[in-house]
Amino acid sequence: MKFVDEYRDPAAARGLVARITDLAGDDSFKFMEVCGGHTHTIYRHGIEHVLPRSVELVHGPGCPVCVIPMGRIDDAIAVAETPGVIFTSFGDMMRVPGGHGNLLEAKARGADVRFVYSPLDALRIAMEHPDREVVFFAVGFETTAPSTAVTLLKARHDDVRNFSVFSNHVTIVPPIKAILESPDLRLDGFLGPGHVSTVIGNHPYRFVPRQYGKPLVTAGFEPLDILQSIVMLLTQIRQGRCEVENQYTRIVRDEGNPRALQLLAEVFELRPHFEWRGLGFISQSALKLRADFAPWDAELRYAVPNVRVADPKACQCGEVLKGVIKPWECKVFGTACTPETPIGTCMVSSEGACAAYYNFGRLHREAAVTLGRASA
Amino acid sequence: MCLGIPGQIVELLDGDEQLARVEVTGVRRTVNVGLLEDEVVGIGDWVLIHVGFAMSKIDEDEASAALSSLRMMGQGYDDEIEALLASRVEARESAARTGSG
């Protein structure tokens, strides 16, 4: 059976599912996976179908493409359409719709928009085109922000003056807090993000058990990691413990990556507030360049409209990002909103919950039910 | 962007830019290893690469697991690999070494 093979160790998967079923007993539990990478694994491997009905996973705000509000895309397009500018962006961002189309459409209208894999590629383009102004559209959580920091330090070191960064870097802890404060959702715990935690470590999550009484387990990205993390959450609950635990010890250290954190602190500071798609304004949740880096700050160098744009009425990305609804419960899911013609951000990124469900969610259902329920 | 791609270090490049050559799916690319400073890396080590930077040292099992998971992503993986291979993070040529630093 293809589905079982994909777990790499089907016997271990069955064992973990049986353990989850035992631990859950007759109670029901709702856990949030914060990270888009986890959402992808969950749908790709049909994990929601192998779990007992008493354990539900809901998606969180950990997809950096998904949380960028429409107004910031419009700002990006305004910069991209400034004469003389070469605007560089990760491929993921090119099709994210703003209030006035997306970056690909701006490119079709004549803007010089190029996609890059790394901020260092953007810097290199600047060094090769000294007569042009090159702007890098920086997005991402603490996983990618250190890369932007290194690039900015290099730009300063090499005195590359025709390069700047439009920073949309965000931080993971404030949205988790916002979700815990939200009255919409009753959660029993969190699967903590894997890659972000390689940078920030596990300590920043301690407020989750301490202030909110919810356990959090930092989880890896293999299907077995997800299942193991659910076992760890349920075990804590059954033993009356409530802590931050680390399932992804292969990669995540409790103290994170001090070097990366130091670089972040050197280059960036927290914005007083930043708008998140679906979550609204969250204080101290995003990174801007420090004053030392003003010559490389695109927000200071260009006329950024900075206009707030409300999400389209039909789009329910906000509720998907808070885990209030599942992708398929959105009114436009799979009809007006598809990966080819996305209305909302969650349908754009391969790590967005809607795109992941659209691409994979309907696979494996039968096989998954066979595996999961057989051991239930 | 958030996908970590596993690569194996085949050469540590000289110079102050902390670059290394890594082999990713049979192709060699240059990545920055400066964010791993607290961990010693050497030739043959596996690393997880995000947007041109090695962010974590991993073992070979983890690398092979990550790679097989990525392959199952289909288009998302193809796009990421294609982007990585198009990346031109390279050591500075001496001609470009005119900075003020």
Image (cartoon, coloured by chain):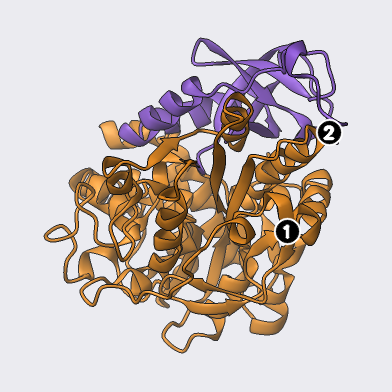
**Camera-side residue of B85 and A129:** A129
Q: Across the whole image, how many numbered discs are drawn on residues?
A: 2
- Colour assigned to chain A in the rendering is orange
Residue A345 position, x and y percent, is 34, 59
Mark pair 1, 2: CA separation: 20 Å
Dividing the picture into quarters, in which one does residue B35 lie?
A: top right
The single residue placed furthest to the bottom in the displayed view is A183
The crowd level at tag 2 (other Cα within 10 Å; few <14, some 14-19, many 20+) is few
Q: Secondary structure at mark 2?
A: loop
Residue A188 position, x and y percent, is 52, 76
Residue at x 67%, y 61% (from the top left corner): A288
Rendered purple, the chain in question is B
**Residue occupied by mark 1:** A202
The crowd level at tag 1 (other Cα within 10 Å; few <14, some 14-19, many 20+) is many
Image position of A111 with respect to A180: above or below: above
Residue at x 62%, y 66% (from the top left corner): A286
Query: Disc 1 marks which amino acid?
Result: Asn
Image position of A268 with respect to A321: above or below: above
**Camera-side residue of A57 and A266:** A266
Q: Is residue A371 left or right of residue B6?
A: left
Q: Secondary structure at mark 1?
A: loop
**Residue occupied by mark 2:** B37
The C terminus of chain B lies in which quarter of the figure?
Answer: top right
- Give the chain letter at badge 2: B
- Give the chain letter at badge 1: A
Residue A197 position, x and y percent, is 67, 52
Image position of A70 with respect to A111: above or below: below
Mark in the foreground, 1 or 2: 2
Dividing the picture into quarters, in which one does residue A205 lie?
A: bottom right
